[in-house]
Amino acid sequence: MEIQEILNLLKENKADFTLLVQKEPDILKSLIEIESTEPSAVKFAAEKAVRSISGHNPKLFEGIETEIFSLLKSENTFIRLGNIVTCANLSVLSRDKTLELLIEDYIPFLYSTNIAEFGNAVKGIPKIISVFPSLEEKLIPPLFEISERVFIHKGKPSDECRNVAAGKVMEVFEKIGKNSPYRQEMLNFAANNLTNTRNSAKRKAEKLVKKLKG
């Protein structure tokens, strides 16, 4: 399928690319190219399609992981955010190259001052650890530093963003904490957030304490 035809389908927003790529795998490379080079807003539709494909059929990305991970360096925030999710999905490929790229290009987002970037990166941790258990020692310790982290919102440090971050971290801890070598540290983190000023974070802390003590 020619690029122009793909662009038209993206603009019409009617095509199911998760089905189309099963018939024509090369469409995926075209979608990635559109994400990377298209100046118009249609690149966001391409990113969404690529993200969906990564969730449904990650094996199609074998051999082109580098192209996807390179989009984590995009100057466009929305392209970066979507591809953080896509890159986590690609961990199921269980390839040495994917592991290398996760370490080099994904993990730095766990130190981002942007709450959206941080949140998307944290969300992918359970999936990554399920495939690469050895990465837990690189993925989990940075999360315990949230209380000392500065998140920027509208150009200024935001305590509320830090509270949101704590909530996202505890969601992950709830999924992996029972079997984690960091279980006690996770419990301590939850206990420290029992007085979090954000109600949703406080509730997550209460739930996590109960689960990890049980």
Image (cartoon, rainbow, N blue to C red):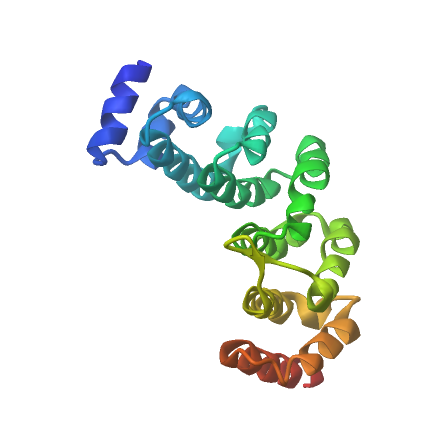
Q: Is residue 103 left or right of residue 17?
A: right
Q: Tell me where residue 69 appears, x and y as whole percent.
A: 59, 32
Taking depth in this image into account, of 112 and 104 the one nearest to the observer is 112
Considering the image in quadrants, where does the N terminus appear? top left
Considering the image in quadrants, where does the C terminus appear? bottom right
Query: Which residue ends up furthest to the top in the rendered image?
Result: 2
Q: How many marks?
A: 0
Taking depth in this image into account, of 172 and 161 the one nearest to the observer is 161
* Residue 57 visible in the displayed image: no
Q: Is residue 36 left or right of residue 123?
A: left
- The residue located at (51%, 46%) in the rendering is 85
Q: Tell me where residue 180 appears, x and y as whole percent.
A: 74, 66
Up the image or down, 119 lies above or below 42; here it is below
* Residue 32 visible in the displayed image: yes
Question: Quarter-wise, where is residue 91 in the image?
Answer: top right
Question: Quarter-wise, where is residue 126 in the image?
Answer: bottom right
Q: Tell me where residue 16 appears, x and y as whole percent.
A: 28, 36
- The residue located at (45%, 41%) in the rendering is 78
- The residue located at (72%, 72%) in the rendering is 186
Up the image or down, 54 lies above or below 22; here it is below
Up the image or down, 42 lies above or below 129; here it is above
Q: Tell me where residue 110 appears, x and y as whole percent.
A: 66, 52
- The residue located at (29%, 22%) in the rendering is 6
Q: Is residue 171 left or right of residue 2?
A: right
Question: Quarter-wise, where is residue 167 in the image?
Answer: bottom right
